[in-house]
Structures are given as structure tokens and as C-alpha cells.
């Protein structure tokens, strides 16, 4: 086990029931009540965040709203306001950056801080964490849970141990006592698929994983097996990466059709093409994404955008396309002709981050290899060297002058 540097340098901050807490803060009449934030309070969507008062009734994120209402009939349903949460997330990041320049946003409500070298100004990691906690409470009226550890992995696992409003320290010497007894699916990076493989091998705790011969894990899980075994032993050399702060917020392509269209097959082939362009740009930047947004503009210029968020990160064309396609088939008003379509991905992260690498291992390995192979051919022979069968139709139409301009864009 890595014990050479047991200094507490990393703080992981995870806001408690973030969206619901922001809503309760904004509207005092919601405080102390079960609040459920969702996309559409009247509709069929899923729960985005439940306040702790609602969680007592068993309401959880990603649960259908209908089921949440059954569990907690007196819950107050609130339509999520993403731009507000993003704004507060940005303000939280700038609060953290007063204490250390090395801040890595991990999601809209989580961040890693490396506070090594900040002692003289602000005290040790535990003191800094306490100051930040107080400041978040005083300036935002919000609580968070913090993990403090010598590595990102342990800090991330620590912040999950006492929620809400927790502050947990894990050192390497605690790994056997604190991390090893946990169920293996509690280890960061072990998703549903990996957990099933491990459990079939009789590996049910993190400790059992740490003691499994690495050859067996590599045989069953590929290189992810080696990485996970290291993590189970508390080994994680990844650094807090502040540059992730500056990466694009989204990557998108859109195209104006040469002629307004209500031809479903044609529009789907445009969506496929745009999805491939977006996927390719994601991979060129070494990024992965969780959210896919479809934009449709009708011939009268009214515009519709609809988004869907995965529970995992992906950079695969297929995931982007299938999601955009579902959104299209679900939301397109078939009586209206379409003038423009766009596909955008957001909620981006670096695929080099070990935590996201592990999320990627949950992907279908075969599809990823196929995508890599297609990228290599495109690198060599140009963008149009490979098109999937349904794109051929688009090619034919393009020759007939029906395909339009394609524009790519980043927003930061
Ligand atoms: Mg949170």
C-alpha cells in the first residue's frame, strides 16, 4: 500500500441535496418540507433531486416522479432551474479558489481541492475545510459534505460517509478499517456491470477485491481490473486537475436544411451525421459527456430544445445518436416542417480523469473499439471516409441539393 505520503492534501466537497437545497434557500416556504426537483412537475419525468425531508419517505434521484408522489404524497414538486444551479456552482468554485488555486470541478455540485502548500495562509486541510463549510453556510445558506484525504479517491469516498453536513477524514492507515468492509459496489468506479462480474467471482467487499490476484481481475475486467484493484488498496496517484475548469461547457453541431422537411428518415439521418460530428469532436478533445440536447427549429422559426442526461459518461456516437433520436421521435410535432436540427453534448469531463475512465469501462468495450477504429480511418482518409448505412441516403440527397450547411460550435 502507498504510505510514503500520508499528508492530507485533498478535499472533496459534495453539496447536500443541491438542487432541492437551492430551491429551499430561494423560497423560505419550502424549508423543512419534502421538496422534489424534477424536469416537469406535472409530467412523466424522473426525480432530479429530493430534499432530505423527502428522502425519509424513500424518494431518490432518478426515480419516476409518479412513484415519488406515491411514496410522499405531500411532497412539493418544483421545476428545476438549471441556470440558477449553474450560477451558484460557479460562485462556489470561486469561493474555493480563494483558498487554493488548485480546484477541479467534478460535477455541478462537487469539486476537488488540492490544499497542499496553503497551510501558512489558511491552516491545514481540516482547518481549511471547516472555514469553507462555514463560508458556504453563511454566504449561500447551504450545507455540504466533505472528505479529506491524501488522495482524490479517498477524499471522494470520505465525503460520502457522513451526509448531510459531514466532514470525514480518511488516511491510508484507515483503508483496511474503513474502506475494506464496504460492499464492493461502494468503491468508486464499480458500476452495476462491474459489480455483477465481481459478485459472481465471490468478491463482495472492497477488501476482498484488494486481496484478489490481479491476474484474475485482468482476465475478467481487462485493464480496469488492475485499476480497480489499486483503488481498492487505496492507491490513486491522480492529481487534482484545475484545467478542467477551463474546458468547454458544451460541444455542438447544427445544420440548416436546404429545404424545410418533414421527412422522418431524412431528419434522422441528419441527426446521425451531427451526432457523429459531435462524438468525434468530444474524442478529439479527450472529453466525455453526460447530457445530450436536441434542438429543432420549425419553419416558422419557433425553436424547441430537449435534453437527456445519462447516468454515465460517454463519447460514443451511438449513445449520442440514440439519445438524440429518442428525443426527436418523442418531441417532434409531425405536422410541422423542420428548418434546422442541432445536437449538443454538455456536462463534460476529461476522459483522462481516472474516475471517468472507470465510468467508461462500464461501456460496451466492443462498441468503443469500433468507434476508435472509425476515428483512425477518418484521421487517415478524412471525415467522409466512413458513413453508416443510413447516411448513404443523406449522401444521395446531398447530391440532389437537399442537405444544408453544418456548423459546429463550442460554448464556454
Ligand atoms: Mg451532492
Image (cartoon, rainbow, N blue to C red):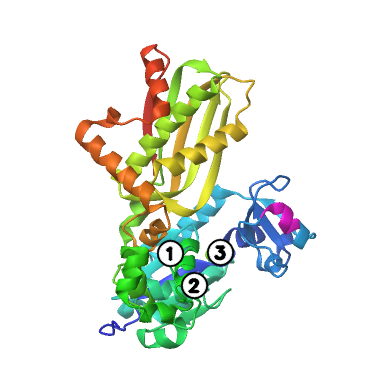
Report the front residue among 228 and 188.
Answer: 228
Between the C-alphas of marks 2 and 1, the distance is 19 Å
Q: Which residues are magenta?
A: 64-69
Of the image marks 2 and 3, the number of the one nearer the N terminus: 3
Q: Where does residue 13 sit, x and y in percent of width and height?
A: 46, 69
Task: Say which element carries label 1.
Answer: strand
Image point (61%, 56%), residue name:
62
Q: Is residue 345 above or below residue 297?
A: below
Locate the C terminus and report the quarter of the image it occupies: top left
Magenta part, dominant SS: helix
How far from the left and from the top, in percent, is residue 185? Answer: 49, 71
Q: Dot 2 surroundings within 10 Å: few (below 14), some, or many (20 or more)?
A: some
Mark 3 crowd level (few <14, some 14–19, many ≥20, 10 Å Cα): some
**From the viewer's perspective, is the residue at label 3 or at label 1 nearer?**
1
Instruction: Identify the residue position indicated by label 2 in the image.
Output: 186
Distance Cα–Cα, label 3 vs label 1? 16 Å
Is residue 291 visible from the viewing direction of this image? yes
On the image, numbered disc 1 is attached to which residue?
111
CA gap, disc 2 and disc 3: 30 Å
Disc 3 element: helix
Which residue is depicted at the point 62% across and 23% down?
Answer: 334
Q: Is residue 66 magenta?
A: yes
Task: Report the side of 283 relative to 257 (left or right).
Answer: left
Q: Nearer the viewer, mark 2 or mark 1?
A: 2
Q: Where, by quadrant of the figure, is residue 398 drawn?
A: top left
Label 2 SS: helix
Q: Residue furthest right?
A: 74
- Does residue 334 appear to the left or right of 227 in the view shown? right
Count of numbered labels shown in the rendering: 3
First in sequence: mark 3 vs mark 1:
1
Q: Which mark is residue 140?
A: 3
Amino acid at each position: 500500500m502507498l504510505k510514503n505520503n500520508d499528508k492530507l492534501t485533498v478535499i472533496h466537497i459534495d453539496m447536500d441535496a443541491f438542487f432541492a437545497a437551492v430551491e429551499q434557500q430561494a423560497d423560505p416556504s419550502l424549508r423543512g418540507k419534502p421538496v422534489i426537483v424534477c424536469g416537469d412537475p406535472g409530467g412523466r419525468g424522473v426525480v432530479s433531486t429530493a430534499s432530505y425531508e423527502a428522502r425519509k419517505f424513500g424518494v431518490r434521484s432518478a426515480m419516476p416522479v409518479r412513484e415519488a408522489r406515491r411514496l410522499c404524497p405531500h411532497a412539493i414538486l418544483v421545476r428545476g432551474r438549471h441556470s440558477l444551479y449553474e450560477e451558484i456552482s460557479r460562485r462556489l468554485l470561486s469561493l474555493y479558489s480563494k483558498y487554493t488555486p488548485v480546484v477541479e470541478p467534478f460535477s455541478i455540485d462537487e469539486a476537488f481541492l488540492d490544499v497542499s502548500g496553503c497551510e501558512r495562509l489558511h491552516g491545514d486541510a481540516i482547518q481549511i475545510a471547516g472555514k469553507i463549510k462555514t463560508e458556504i453556510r453563511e454566504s449561500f445558506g447551504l450545507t455540504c459534505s466533505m472528505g479529506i484525504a491524501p488522495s482524490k479517491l479517498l477524499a471522494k469516498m470520505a465525503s460520502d460517509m457522513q451526509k448531510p453536513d459531514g466532514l470525514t477524514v480518511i488516511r491510508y492507515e484507515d483503508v483496511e478499517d474503513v474502506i475494506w468492509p464496504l460492499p464492493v459496489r461502494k468503491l468508486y468506479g464499480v458500476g452495476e456491470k462491474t459489480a455483477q462480474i465481481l459478485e459472481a467471482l465471490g468478491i463482495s467487499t472492497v477488501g476482498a477485491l484488494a486481496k484478489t490476484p490481479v491476474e484474475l481481475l485482468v482476465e475478467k475486467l481487462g485493464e480496469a481490473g488492475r485499476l480497480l484493484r489499486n483503488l481498492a488498496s487505496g492507491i490513486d496517484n491522480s492529481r487534482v486537475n484545475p484545467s478542467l475548469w477551463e474546458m468547454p461547457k458544451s460541444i455542438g453541431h447544427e445544420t440548416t436544411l436546404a429545404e424545410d422537411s418533414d421527412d422522418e428518415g431524412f431528419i434522422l439521418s441528419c441527426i446521425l451525421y451531427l451526432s457523429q460530428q459531435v462524438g468525434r469532436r468530444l474524442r478529439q478533445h479527450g472529453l466525455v459527456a453526460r447530457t445530450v440536447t436536441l434542438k429543432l427549429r420549425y419553419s416558422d422559426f419557433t425553436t424547441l430544445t430537449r435534453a437527456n442526461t445519462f447516468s454515465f459518461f460517454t463519447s460514443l456516437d451511438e449513445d449520442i445518436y440514440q439519445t438524440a433520436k429518442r428525443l426527436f421521435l418523442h418531441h417532434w410535432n409531425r405536422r410541422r416542417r423542420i428548418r434546422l436540427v442541432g445536437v449538443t453534448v454538455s456536462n463534460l469531463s476529461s476522459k483522462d480523469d481516472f474516475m471517468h475512465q472507470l465510468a467508461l469501462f462500464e461501456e460496451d468495450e466492443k462498441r468503443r473499439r469500433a468507434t476508435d477504429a472509425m476515428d483512425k480511418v477518418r484521421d487517415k482518409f478524412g471525415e467522409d471516409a466512413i458513413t453508416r448505412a443510413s447516411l448513404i441516403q443523406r449522401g444521395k440527397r446531398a447530391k440532389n441539393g437537399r442537405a444544408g450547411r453544418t456548423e459546429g460550435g463550442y460554448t464556454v
